[in-house]
Amino acid sequence: MTKINEWLASNTFHHSQYWDLLKLVEEKEKQNLTISLCIPTLNEETTIGKEVIIFISELMKRYPLLDEIAVIDSGSTDKTLDVASTFGADVYLSADILPEYGEKKGKGENLWKAIYQLKGDIIVYVDADIKNIHPRFVYGLVAPLIYRPEIKYVKAFYDRPLAFSQGVRPSGGGRVTEILTRPMFSLFFPELTAIIQPLSGEYAVRREVLERIPFPIGYGVETSHLIDVYHQWGMDAFGQTDLDQRVHRNQATRSLGKMSFGIMQTFLNRCESLGVINEMPDLGKVLYQFQAHDKTYEPIEHAIVEEERPPMMEIAEYREKFHPND
């Protein structure tokens, strides 16, 4: 507990520490850093426009902290791409990036392909469903990387009220974290319990880290990142920033069950590959849920396979683009 407390005291921040954006931009330019924002999307037409407008107006035009803003899309069938493009974001279909490696469906696929497509020394990922979007969702995460060169990976944490049609509930959210992820970390990787919201979709990472870790394409991507960065660089590589509050849409319990199933696959596979657990049996790939029809119960099967993309440094096209002299 002493080590966790020491880490919390030294590597946990609040976005208000970084209110002076002019100073932050000056320090970024002094280090000759470039920063890219990636927003992964799938049918986010109701929220993507506001995110793009705020980030471009506040963090590109008013304070030039970001060098590019890109939407990486999984194949939206609504107006997500049109809205994002109209308001000034660079828009890419995930399927069009490194097409020779095929197309896989999942948020992790978009995050992985962003490493190849975007140019920044730092990439900050922000989910597209945030209803109270604010520039702090970016500067609060990149600032520790700019001011603390030993930190490589900064996660967001916040209060997570859930948005309903009749208003905002005063508490809630983070159910998978508290029921699944935190207990599993407590059992196998106790130091990682210091990460207050390990599944948050907002984080900023140095390219030198992103290009060296594999990416599950589905629900397990955030969990695998934490384990892999911890294994390779230790807790000192992490930071976390309190962003106060994040308002987002609710998810049904059944959806959280599917998420948990994917995270469990990734978690157990990591434990085996790192030698934390030996001789694991073959894991099932089908999640069973049930729904009732009068007095009968119908099983619903969900096939969920957490495939992984390799570290980007293993991709020849990436090495040719970013490390041509290696």
Image (cartoon, rainbow, N blue to C red):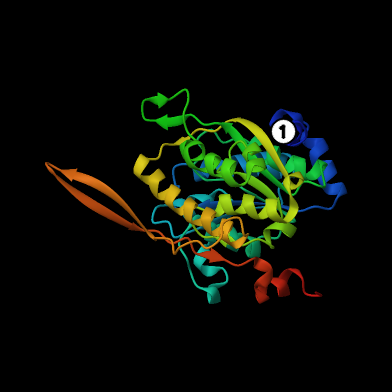
**Residue 162 spot, x, y in % from top left:** 45, 31
The residue most toward the front is: 279
Q: Quadrant of the C terminus?
A: bottom right
Task: Please tell me which residue lies in front, 76 or 311.
Answer: 311
For the question of whether residue 154 can be seen, the reply is: yes
Q: Residue at x 53, y 61 (%)?
A: 109
Asked if residue 7 lies left or right of residue 317, the reply is right
Asked if residue 296 lies left or right of residue 213, the reply is left
**Residue 309 spot, x, y in % from top left:** 56, 66
The residue most toward the top is: 170
User: Residue beneath label 1, please?
Assistant: 8
Q: Residue at x 72, y 33 (%)?
A: 8
Task: Please tell me which residue lies in front, 27 or 45.
Answer: 27
The residue most toward the left is: 295
Task: Please tell me which residue lies in front, 118 or 230.
Answer: 230
For badge 1, the amino acid type reads Leu
Q: Within the image, what quadrant is residue 308 found in? A: bottom right
Label 1 CA crowd tier, 10 Å (few <14, some 14–19, many 20+): some
Compared with 255, 221 (above or below) is below
**Residue 156 spot, x, y in % from top left:** 63, 39
Q: Residue at x 41, y 25 (%)?
A: 167
Q: Within the image, what quadrant is residue 116 found in? A: bottom right
**Residue 22 spot, x, y in % from top left:** 80, 36
Disc 1 element: helix
Compared with 221, 236 (above or below) is above
Q: Residue at x 43, y 31 (%)?
A: 163
